[in-house]
């Protein structure tokens, strides 16, 4: 009995590889977005700490604190703009991944259908073979009975 062979297996492997690559690319984008978000969170924490510090009588220290807070807020705006760009890239990667997964699924379904057809054909051939053997055995038994009666 021959083994099931799917002719489009190389195509399926290539598509699976593309899906894996797309998942990795999306993961990189998500990691970069999370890294940027962590920077914003760190800046917000520092701003909160600076705002919660006690009163300062020296105007220079107060000015330095105010400048630091403004710098952190400007950095957060810049980082948020980067995150917005990363979100656009993320959406693009998600669409690419969805399309690649759809293409892979088409080949998977075709493979499953071909495998089911193959299994049906093999089962049918096995049943025909078993029926043929049973039929031969029955004919041989009848022939033996007929020969036994005439002897």
Image: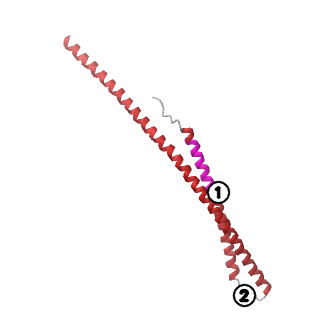
Q: Quarter holding the N terminus?
A: top left
Viewer-side residue, 60 vs 142: 60
Task: Where is residue 113? Give x, y as percent.
Answer: 44, 40
The earlier-in-sequence mark between 2 and 1 is: 1
Residue 78 vertical position relative to residue 20 in the rendered view, above or below:
below
* Residue at the outermost left position: 149
Residue 86 in magenta? no
Viewer-side residue, 134 vs 15: 15
> Going 47% across and 29% down the picture, which residue do you hit?
2
Q: Quadrant of residue 147?
A: top left
Total numbered labels placed on residues in the image: 2
Residue 15 in magenta? yes
Q: Quadrant of residue 137?
A: top left
Side of 124 where 22 appears, left or right: right
- Examine the residues drawn in magenta and state their main secondary structure: helix
Task: Where is residue 29? Give x, y as percent.
Answer: 64, 58
Local SS, label 2: loop
List the residue tagged with mark 2: 55
Its colouring scheme is secondary structure
- Is the Cβ of the residue at disc 2 closer than 8 Å to that at disc 1? no
Labelled disc at residue 28 = 1
Residue 130 vertical position relative to residue 37 in the rendered view, above or below:
above
Give the alpha-carbon distance from disc 2 to disc 1, as whole Å: 44 Å
* Residue at the outermost top position: 151
Labelled disc at residue 95 = none
Span highlighted in magenta in the image: 12-29
> Going 40% across and 35% down the picture, which residue do you hit?
120
* Residue at the outermost bottom position: 57
């Amino acid at each position: 009995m021959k083994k099931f062979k799917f002719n489009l297996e190389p195509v399926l492997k290539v598509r699976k590889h593309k899906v894996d690559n797309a998942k990795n690319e999306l993961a990189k984008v998500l990691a970069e977005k999370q890294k940027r978000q962590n920077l914003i969170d760190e800046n917000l924490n520092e701003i909160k700490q600076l705002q919660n510090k006690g009163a300062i009588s020296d105007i220079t220290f107060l000015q330095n604190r105010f400048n630091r807070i403004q710098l952190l807020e400007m950095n957060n705006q810049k980082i948020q703009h980067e995150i917005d760009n990363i979100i656009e890239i993320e959406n693009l990667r998600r669409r690419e991944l969805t399309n690649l997964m759809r293409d892979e699924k088409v080949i998977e379904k075709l493979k499953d259908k071909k495998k089911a057809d193959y299994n049906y054909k093999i089962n049918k051939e096995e049943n025909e073979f078993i029926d043929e053997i049973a039929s031969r055995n029955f004919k041989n038994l009848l022939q033996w009975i007929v020969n036994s009666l005439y002897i």
